[in-house]
Image (tube, rainbow, N blue to C red):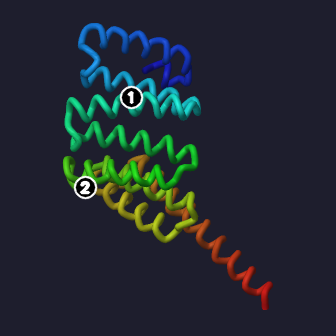
Amino acid sequence: MVHYSKANYEQALEFLQKSLKIRIQTLGKEHPDVATSYNNIGSVHDSKGNYEQALEFYQKSLKIRIQVLGKEHPEVASSYNNIGLVHDSKGNYEQALEFYQKSLKIWIQTLGKEHPDVATSYNNISMVHYSKANYEQALEFYQKSLEIRIQTLGKEHPDVASTYNNIDLVKKAKKKSEKSKDTCILSFI
């Protein structure tokens, strides 16, 4: 995944496809490592903005993970989260929210309420609410994410800083929206 992290997507895809082929030949089509390969290929397509291809590979990964690991496995939750991210990027907020909530439910059941992956779900749900200008709900979920991240990662972790930043952005957008509403009301008087 070195090429992927350096944004050399084409080379990353080439190596990931080779890895996938070897894994299918040696492990079979229904193996968790094959699901991981599909997931990684989906991630590269997602990063490139090839959302339909990303969805295709994430869904292949999800199908295998459900068959092999069961419906309530953390890796299944990860697949749901990734599918939610694609829908979020495409502006399909209701679908994104549906998949984020599925991942949240599984992560809470399998990892507990105070796990960093649960915080990630809350963060992603917040992003959807922010995008839909549901600022109160966005703040509520960012606050949940922040509390878990401070507790599990520590006050100085970059994810904590990112969450503080997101809360600030939501508060600013909420304030701007309220001013805009006030101005609109005054213009009708």
Residue name at image x 39 percent, y 33 percent: 59
Residue 19 at x, y percent in the picture:
37, 12
Q: Amino acid at mark 2?
A: Glu
Which is more toward the observer, 188 or 2?
A: 188
Left or right position of 116 against 109: right
Q: Residues within 10 Å of mark 1 (few under 14, many from 20)?
A: many
Badge nearest the viewer, 2 or 1: 1
Secondary structure of the residue carrying tag 1 is helix
Quickly name the residue at label 1.
39
* Residue 114: assigned label: 2
Q: Earlier in the sequence, mark 2 or mark 1?
A: 1
Q: Quadrant of residue 18?
A: top left
Residue name at image x 36 percent, y 54 percent: 101
Q: Residues within 10 Å of mark 2 (few under 14, many from 20)?
A: some
Q: Quadrant of residue 145?
A: bottom left
Q: Amino acid at mark 1?
A: Asn
